[in-house]
Image: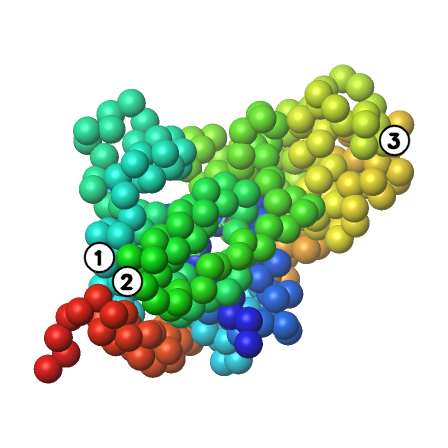
């Protein structure tokens, strides 16, 4: 049986990029795979999180998953900190992966910025925890956005080195699953930057919690260029903002970018933006309503997470025991 593992950090401002690039695709995987979805709270604290905020973000992400259509009964949904085996395997991987490998990680360079000496040790070792997340369940496939490909390569290298160092054929090499349309949703104010949770301008992204007016306003204010929309893909060359907005439309409507070009080619942005806003609102509103319902009483979300963590612990335990045996730890 093919097994999926993926994670989202509960660091706030869950946005349209997370939805189109990640969550929505995961919902669809549920029919063909056994899925494990994780709210990676231990990854989140690699950069300081205000505890009250962290708590509400963990529940918000879990509610978004469920509202978007993840079934926590058929599959597993849990928060990482509640399955200690992640941290235990991550430590072993800290001793397998090499400094040189981690030094090449572009996400660390971006997040640490100029002051690398002042970044947390956890931020540097972050990819090893991510490898542990995946390999603890011997997941075969990992759906991620483009930005996580490098971390997944590292997980494969670590699995391979572990197998080689100990002369075993234990960990499978996990495959990335990268989705085509809207794999990368860009910033509404700058089509060359990724839409991100941490951009200081709220106008740069559509949050999962934005109401219909906010969504329409942000799309109206989104950066464009003076030309009408192109009728072909080639016409998107050198027009990052047009490519992004049309890509978002394609993602939300489940069309190819080609089809969106054919439909809107020659029309002005003003027309297109109205239709895009209506579409975004119609896709997001039902999810938002369900999120609000779930979050009105944390009991249901907490129960789903608790149950998921129990089942995750049960899956992880025998694999971690085998790892301990392979490494040479005594389990008296
Ligand atoms: P993060 O927000 O970095 O915790 O990412 C959570 C998931 O959403 C990962 O699978 C990312 O690859 C994906 N993701 C984040 N931002 C974007 C974006 N702008 N476009 C597409 N996918 C994204
Ligand atoms: N690093 C991922 C991100 O920032 C989140 C993540 C943590 C993850 N562990 C994972 C994704 C395991 C896939 C598999 O988006």
Q: Which residue is depicted at the point 84% across and 36% down?
A: 261
Q: Nearer the viewer, residue 332 or 222?
A: 332
Q: Are marks 3 and 2 in contact (CB under 8 Å)?
A: no
Q: Is residue 184 left or right of residue 331?
A: right
> Residue 229's x, y, as percent?
82, 28
Mark 2 vs ligand 2: CB below 8 Å? no
Disc number at residue 166? Answer: 2
Quarter occupied by the C terminus: bottom left
Q: Is residue 122 left or right of residue 174?
A: left
Quarter occupied by the N terminus: bottom right
> Residue 319's x, y, as percent?
33, 74
Q: Which residue is depicted at the point 62% across and 45% down?
A: 183
Q: Quadrant of residue 307?
A: bottom left
Q: Nearer the viewer, residue 171 or 87?
A: 171
Mark 1 vs ligand 2: CB below 8 Å? no
Q: Which residue is depicted at the point 24% across and 25% down?
A: 115
| Cα–Cα span, label 3 and label 2 | 56 Å
- Disc 1 is placed on an element classified as helix
The residue that mark 1 highlights is 91
The answer to whether residue 105 is above or below residue 72 is above
The residue that mark 3 highlights is 231
| For marks 1 and 3 on the same chain, the one whose residue lies earlier in the sequence | 1
| For marks 2 and 1 on the same chain, the one whose residue lies earlier in the sequence | 1
| Cα–Cα span, label 2 and label 1 | 16 Å
| Mark 2 or 1: the one toward you | 2
Mark 3 vs ligand 1: CB below 8 Å? no
| Mark 3 or 2: the one toward you | 2
| For marks 3 and 2 on the same chain, the one whose residue lies earlier in the sequence | 2
Disc number at residue 68? Answer: none
């Amino acid at each position: 049986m093919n097994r999926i593992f993926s994670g989202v950090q509960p660091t706030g401002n869950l946005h349209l990029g997370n939805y189109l690039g990640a969550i929505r695709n995961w919902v669809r995987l549920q029919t063909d795979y056994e899925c494990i979805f994780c709210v990676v709270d231990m990854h989140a604290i690699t950069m300081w999180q205000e505890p009250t905020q962290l708590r509400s973000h963990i529940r918000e992400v879990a509610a978004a998953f469920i509202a978007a259509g993840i079934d926590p009964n058929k599959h597993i949904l849990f928060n990482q900190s509640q399955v200690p085996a992640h941290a235990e395997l991550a430590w072993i991987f800290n001793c397998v992966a090499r400094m040189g490998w981690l030094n090449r990680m572009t996400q660390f360079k971006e997040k640490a910025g100029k002051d690398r000496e002042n970044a947390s040790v956890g931020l540097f070792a972050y990819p090893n925890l991510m490898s542990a997340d995946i390999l603890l369940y011997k997941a075969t496939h990992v759906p991620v956005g483009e930005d996580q490909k490098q971390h997944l390569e590292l997980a494969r290298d670590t699995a391979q080195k572990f197998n080689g160092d100990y002369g075993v054929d234990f960990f499978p090499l996990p495959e990335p699953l990268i989705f085509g349309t809207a794999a990368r949703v860009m910033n509404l104010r700058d089509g060359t930057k990724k839409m991100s949770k941490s951009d200081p301008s709220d106008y740069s992204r559509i949050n999962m919690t934005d109401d219909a007016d906010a969504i329409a306003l942000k799309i109206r204010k989104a950066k464009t260029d003076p030309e009408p929309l192109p009728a072909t893909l080639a016409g998107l060359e050198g027009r990052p903002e047009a490519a992004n907005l049309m890509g978002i439309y394609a993602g939300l409507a489940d069309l190819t970018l080609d089809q969106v070009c054919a439909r809107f080619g020659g029309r002005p942005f003003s027309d297109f933006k109205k239709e895009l806003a209506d579409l975004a609102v119609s896709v997001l509103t039902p999810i938002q309503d369900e999120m609000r319902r779930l979050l009105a009483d944390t009991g249901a979300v907490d129960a789903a997470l608790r149950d998921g963590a129990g089942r995750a612990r049960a899956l992880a335990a025998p694999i971690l025991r085998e790892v301990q045996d392979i490494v040479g730890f005594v389990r008296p």
